[in-house]
Amino acid sequence: MAALKNKRHEKFCHEYIKDMNATQAAIRTGYSEKTAKMQGSRLMTNDDIKSRVAELREAYLDENIMTAKQVEYELTRIALGLSNEKQVVIEGTGEGCSEARIIDKPPDERSRLKALELMAKRHRILSGDTTIDVQPVIIVGGDDIAD
């Protein structure tokens, strides 16, 4: 679906997907605070607006939600110690003074083990759901067997 012809309605749709709040979207679109709740509610009953919001929300999710491959990639980087996180450290500068500084720190062992655990679960390496399929042996004609 293309952009709505009514520019105010189109803007409302874009504002609505920011926080899924029709009243706030109406205010940001230019409706007065007095009537924003009513206007937001009214606009959300419009089929064209509902369709446009659904389309914009889907596009937003496609752009901003990690795919399964991206999750695996990030977990792999953590597990292998290839990623870094920012950490603030306080260092003494002499004469009782100190200074804050930001450093890049590789993941600690706990983080790496958690990433490994999640990857193992994903690939069913460490699943606790091991099943053993046992079937009884049935001997037919057992009376003919000598003791």
Image (cartoon, grey):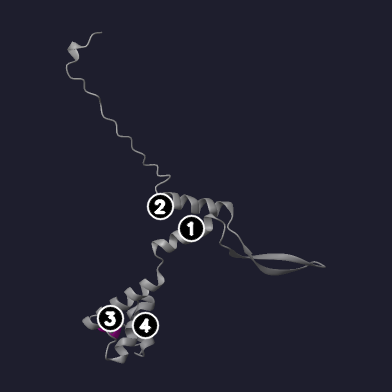
Real-space CA distance between mark 3 and mark 2, rounded to the nearest whole angstrom? 36 Å
Q: Earlier in the sequence, mark 4 or mark 3?
A: 4
Q: Secondary structure at mark 1?
A: helix
Tell me how far mark 4 sits from mark 1, CA to CA. Answer: 33 Å
In the rendered structure, the answer to whether residue 86 lies left or right of residue 101 reads left
Q: Give, as a single range, the part of the protein colored magenta.
A: 39-43
Give the spatial CA distance, label 3 vs label 1. Answer: 35 Å
Q: Are marks 1 and 2 in contact (CB under 8 Å)?
A: yes
Q: Which residue is mark 1?
A: 75
Of the residues under marks 2 and 4, which one precedes in the sequence? 4
Residue at point 28% right, 76% down?
A: 54
Local crowd at mark 2 within 10 Å, few (<14), some, or many (≥20)?
A: few
Q: Determine if the magenta segment contains residue 69.
A: no
Residue ID for mark 4: 15
* Residue farthest right in this picture: 95
Residue at mark 3: 52
- Give SS at disc 3: helix
Q: Residues within 10 Å of mark 4 (few under 14, many from 20)?
A: many
Closer to viewer: mark 4 or mark 1: 1
Residue 143 image-quadrant placement: top left
Label of residue 122 in the image: 2
